[in-house]
Image (cartoon, coloured by chain):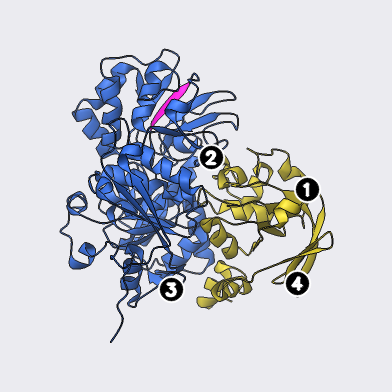
Chain colours: A blue, B yellow
Amino acid sequence: MRCAMGKTIIEKIIGRNCGHDVKPGDIVTVDVDRVMLDDIMMPFIVSKFEEMGFRKVWDPDRVVIICDHLVPASQVDDTRAYHISCDFAEQQGIKNLHRSDGICHQLMTEAGHVKPGHVVFGTDSHTTTYGSVGAFSTGIGYTEMAAILGTGTLWMRVPATIRVNITGKLPDNVMSKDVILRIIGDLTAAGATYKALEFTGDTVEAMSISSRTTMANMAIEAGAKCALFTPDEKTAEYCGITLDDFQKSLSGDPDAVYESVMEYRAEDFVPVMALPSNVDNVKPVRSLEPKPIDQVFLGSCTNGRLEDLMAAAEILKGKKIAPYVKLIVTPASRRIYLEALENGTLSVLSEAGAMITHPSCGLCCGRTGGILTDGERVVATNNRNFLGRMGTSKVEIYLASPKTAAACALTGHITEP
Amino acid sequence: MDKFTGRVWLLGDDIDTDIIMPTEYLVFKKIDDMKPYAFSPLRPELAGQIRPGDIIVAGSNFGCGSSREQAPEVVKALGIRCVIAKSFARIFFRNAINNGLLLIENADLADDMTEGDEITVTVNEKIEYKGKSYPIVSLPENLVEIISAGGLVKAMRRRNGLE
């Protein structure tokens, strides 16, 4: 009789894809369900694809091209990436082309490209995001993407899993951003390298898909290959599907083998910030000096969803931000923009003094507006505070939740919500 | 056995890909055009000082952050012979292998090293510095195949009957 050993979520997804049981450390070749190609990498992807001698992508319906980093263009050179993206889509018969709909990591689930159980690769490190709906997704470079476009396959090593179990109710001023920042601080920037993270416990079960998305998005900041949540009824509703038996099975078995288990009590979390210039340099906001700030950025694929904008609006309603602060709000997609417009959130933010921009990667990668200079300090809801990320290398970037960001915008200095 | 000696540039922990190649230069058409800006957020003068054959020795998590493959490509274009670090971030590791940039993991060298000194590397065997020898662990077989094919582009060209 075969001895059935318990499996983690990633072992189930990869095992099904390969058609045989897998264990951590195995090197396997997977059939790819979806790929995400972003505009900024498209010129290189296309040139490698051609250099490799491929003519046709293996399956146009599994390819999604998203213009987000460089749309609308802020330099003449940016237009090249846009045109290469559109031309390649037309030439290859790729229907899934988003020219100006929002940020790639928001659109991949929002527009229904990714479903629970999928194996997905993208040319952006924050491709870990789709673990929010129980998909295995991770970032790769443009050469490997070109090889997938030609073959539909990629080799990978099955990762060991770190289980992160959180139980209880989060304090009102704490958001899932604070949770993941604290976990990254505890793991350190390399603490989950080559590993899968699996989030469990009644705290994450109670979270919205939006909150889970924030956490999966940032898993790469601890080096993780992927971050997985068990698909549930909320996932099914968000993805517009009924979960099939395989998708329903995507939770860690009781006898699954984990490399380690991190246990947290939700009540112990507090609002935190990642201080310049490493994401794992995490401190409670209340322990920080109330230094003045120049700018606040509310947006990105990490925290640019309706829930995030509404959380900030609740704090800012009927008030005015500090006169010397620029509050820049960037909804993660057009759909979110429209929802926030229709439910009055954008009015509240605008009346409080916010500048509201088009949905795109925007300030997060320092490419389309809002850059800062030496000595300036920004509180930002995105995922990276690396040197030079939002302007010069002497800009201080503090990463925080939307609630903390809103509280800071009001007072004009580092403030706990 | 491939053996070479090179001058060392010493970098710290968590050298991210935004440092190796900042986002604003990613739209340049050619990797060669990006070379002057490599490592500029951290050490703006470094790219101009690197000579072909030099070696980078760094701390843990080298290449963390963005998936931008321009990062290992520009390191290679600068003529860096190999990068030796305590550890590498996953995506950078794969990208470097696919472009034929040699990476070596070693836990101790960075702590013992002084910038500007020379080291000797015997591939798949050892690193020698000031009379001390540091062992090199060899790569998994499937990666050796990609490297020996001359990188992933060449491996695919061969698959497609072009080489």
Of tags 2 and 4, the one toward the viewer is 2
Quadrant housing residue A58: bottom left
Residue A163 at least partly seen: yes
Q: Which mark is residue A28?
A: 3
- At a point 51% along the width and 25% down the height, the residue shown is A377
Question: What residue did someone put label 1 on?
Answer: B115
Disc 4/disc 3 C-alpha distance (Å) = 30 Å
Give the secondary structure at mark 1: loop
Question: What residue did someone put label 2 on?
Answer: A278
Residue flagged by tag 2: what amino acid is it?
A: Asn
Chain of the residue where label 2 is placed in the rendered structure: A
Q: Residues within 10 Å of mark 1 (few under 14, many from 20)?
A: few
User: Magenta region, mostly helix, strand or loop?
Assistant: strand
Disc 4/disc 1 C-alpha distance (Å) = 23 Å
Give the secondary structure at mark 3: strand
Which stretch did the figure color magenta?
A: A294-298
Q: Residues within 10 Å of mark 4 (few under 14, many from 20)?
A: few
Give the secondary structure at mark 2: loop
Image coordinates for residue A328, horizontal then vertical, percent: 39, 26
Question: What residue did someone put label 4 on?
Answer: B2
Work out whether mark 4 precedes mark 1 in sequence or the reverse, and give the earlier one.
Answer: 4
Of tags 4 and 1, the one toward the viewer is 1
Image coordinates for residue A329, horizontal then vertical, percent: 36, 28
Residue flagged by tag 3: what amino acid is it?
A: Val
Above or below A366: residue B30: below
Looking at the rendered image, the quarter that the C terminus of chain A falls into is top left
Residue flagged by tag 4: what amino acid is it?
A: Asp
